[in-house]
Image (tube, rainbow, N blue to C red):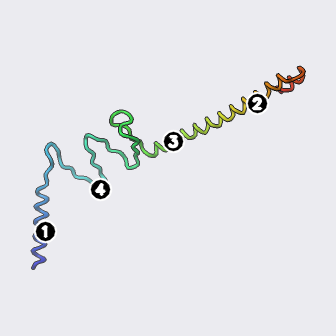
Amino acid sequence: MRQFILALALALVSATAAAEFTCPDKTSAACLDPGDLVCPATSRCVDVGATCFEDYPCQTGEGFVCASSYDEAMAGAQATSAQYDKLAAENVALREERLQKRNCVINAQSLKAAIACVR
């Protein structure tokens, strides 16, 4: 009998609690499916994979990027940096070669020797 009364009391309490559901002023209730997100009107919803770099680094409301887009941008930046490093190394080698040829021509004892320096 006690279990029946307890079950009846719980049923009444849950029914009463469901009937007393209210929303704050100027708001409305919503029914959500599993996985749905609720975002306040004063903020912006972002994907789980989004990365925030800092608060408002760009215009108001921006500043978020998907991790996949960030990874693509970083890969591009790293490739550009590697290309720059390669070109800088080639530039140093060409400058060294030019300096050696210049010194050879300056120190050449004859026109034939100077021509040999640059070939």
State the mark number for residue 34: 4
Question: What residue do we see at 49% from left, 44% from top?
Answer: 71
Q: From the viewer's perspective, is the residue at label 2 or at label 3 nearer? A: 2
State the mark number for residue 97: 2
Q: From the viewer's perspective, is the residue at label 2 or at label 4 nearer? A: 2
Q: Looking at the image, tell me whether mark 4 or mark 1 is earlier in sequence order.
A: 1
Neighbourhood count class around disc 1 (C-alpha, 10 Å): few under 14, some 14–19, many 20 upward: few
Residue type for callout 4: Pro
Residue type for callout 2: Glu
Instruction: Please state which of residues 44 and 29 is positioned toward the viewer in this rendering.
Output: 44
Q: Looking at the image, tell me whether mark 3 or mark 1 is earlier in sequence order.
A: 1
Question: What residue do we see at 60% from left, 39% from top?
Answer: 82
Q: From the viewer's perspective, is the residue at label 1 or at label 2 nearer? A: 2
In this picture, is 53 found above or below 105?
below
Measure the alpha-carbon separation of dots 2 and 4: 68 Å
Residue type for callout 1: Leu
Q: Quadrant of the C terminus?
A: top right
- Residue highlighted by disc 1: 10
Neighbourhood count class around disc 3 (C-alpha, 10 Å): few under 14, some 14–19, many 20 upward: few
Q: Are marks 1 and 2 in contact (CB under 8 Å)?
A: no
Q: Looking at the image, tell me whether mark 2 or mark 4 is earlier in sequence order.
A: 4
Measure the alpha-carbon separation of dots 3 and 1: 57 Å
Asked which secondary structure carries label 2, the reply is helix
Q: From the viewer's perspective, is the residue at label 4 or at label 1 nearer? A: 1
Q: Are marks 3 and 4 in contact (CB under 8 Å)?
A: no
Q: Looking at the image, tell me whether mark 3 or mark 4 is earlier in sequence order.
A: 4
